[in-house]
Each structure stands twice: as structure tokens, then as C-alpha cells.
Image (tube, grey):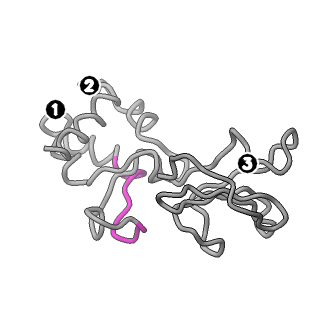
């Protein structure tokens, strides 16, 4: 996450940049990418975590809207934990497989910590999302929101 209170910290590529003082997160303009960038590393050379085009109504300022987020920022659950939670709620294994197919990311993801080396289900993955995939199911026993919540609760248990 890049949440926090940012303070103006100087200039970069001819525009102001901001730094969140406790964690070192930054917001800056990239003339190379032609976008505003935000990430959790105090390094202008790394690939930005979030980006947004400049707002012509406010040149020189980061925009208030239009930010692009990586898929993992919308939610990620462990494949096996979510599978068990859905099966316990009465969702059949073949239905779960159909639901998971476009949302599954195997070990080749960039997440670290408890995610490392595990197959994951991304709530949003390459333009597809859990809610839209859930709508394709025939007579699901629970709502998409309840299904995702079951996975979150099982993860926290």
C-alpha cells in the first residue's frame, strides 16, 4: 500500500515530488513514462507500483483520479484455502475449477511473505475478476461477496 500523508520533498524531471516521511514512499512525475508514479520504495528507477496520466486541468500536480493499480492490490487469497472454504459452503469442485481458471496465478508471481511459492487466486487478474466469473456460475449457493469473505475468514483463522 502507498497510503499515507505525503510532503513535498523536491523536484524530479521538472516537476515536484512528494515523500511519505515515515515509510519513504514517493509520488513523482516520470518524463520517460509520461505518467505520475507512486510506489513504496524511495527510488526513481524502479518500476512504479501505481501510475496515472497527468490531469491537464492540474499540470505539475499528481492527479486525484485515473490511477492504475496492480491486480494484487484488489485482493489475493491462497488457492487451497479459498478452495476448501468454497467446498465447505457447498460449491462443487468442478465449479470451483471453472471459477478459478482465469484468476489463478501459480508460483511465478511477485508477491513475497506468506504468498511466496503458493498458487494464488487474484480477485482481479488480467482484466477478469472474481465477481464477473461468479456471475457465470449456475445457481451458486452464496453471493460472490460472501464467497470471497469466506476465503478471507478462512485465511485469518
Please say if 112 is above or below 56.
below
Of mark 1 and mark 3, the one earlier in the sequence is 3
For the magenta stretch, what is the residue range? 100-110
Q: Report, in whole angstroms, how far the alpha carbon at label 1 lies from the one at label 2.
A: 8 Å
Rendered location of residue 7, percent (x, y):
63, 52
Q: Residue at x 19, y 50 (%)?
A: 81
Q: Secondary structure at mark 2?
A: loop
Q: Main secondary structure of the magenta part?
A: loop
Of mark 3 and mark 2, the one earlier in the sequence is 3
Q: Are marks 1 and 2 in contact (CB under 8 Å)?
A: yes
Q: Residue at x 46, y 50 (%)?
A: 73
Rendered location of residue 40, percent (x, y):
52, 61
Q: Report, in whole angstroms, how far the alpha carbon at label 1 lies from the one at label 3.
A: 44 Å
Rendered location of residue 150, percent (x, y):
22, 35
Q: Name the quadrant of the C terminus.
A: top left
* Of labels 3 and 2, the one closer to you: 3
Q: Which residue is the extreme one toward the bottom?
A: 45
Q: Is residue 82 left or right of residue 134?
A: left
The residue carrying mark 3 is 62
- Asked whether 5 or 72 is in front, the reply is 5
Please say if 26 is above or below 75.
below
Q: Is residue 150 left or right of residue 41?
A: left
Please give the label number shown on residue 142.
2
Q: Are marks 1 and 3 in contact (CB under 8 Å)?
A: no
Q: Residue at x 34, y 52 (%)?
A: 121
Q: Secondary structure at mark 3?
A: loop
Please give the label number shown on residue 89.
1
Q: Residue at x 62, y 49 (%)?
A: 68
Q: Secondary structure at mark 1?
A: loop
Amino acid at each position: 500500500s502507498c497510503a499515507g500523508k505525503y510532503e513535498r520533498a523536491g523536484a524530479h524531471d521538472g516537476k515536484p515530488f512528494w515523500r511519505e516521511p515515515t515509510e519513504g514512499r514517493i509520488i513523482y512525475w516520470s518524463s520517460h513514462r509520461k505518467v505520475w508514479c507512486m510506489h513504496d520504495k524511495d527510488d526513481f528507477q524502479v518500476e512504479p507500483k501505481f501510475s496515472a496520466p497527468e490531469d491537464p486541468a492540474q499540470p505539475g500536480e499528481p492527479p486525484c483520479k485515473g490511477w492504475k493499480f496492480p491486480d494484487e492490490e484488489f485482493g489475493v487469497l491462497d488457492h487451497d484455502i479459498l478452495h476448501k472454504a468454497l467446498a465447505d459452503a457447498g460449491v462443487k469442485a468442478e465449479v470451483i475449477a471453472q471459477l478459478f481458471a482465469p484468476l489463478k496465478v501459480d508460483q511465478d508471481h511477485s508477491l513475497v511473505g506468506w504468498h511466496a511459492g503458493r498458487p494464488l487466486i487474484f480477485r482481479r487478474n488480467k482484466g477478469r475478476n472474481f465477481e464477473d466469473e461468479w456471475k457465470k456460475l449456475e445457481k451458486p449457493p452464496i453471493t460472490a461477496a460472501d464467497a470471497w469473505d469466506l476465503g478471507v475468514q478462512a485465511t485469518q483463522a
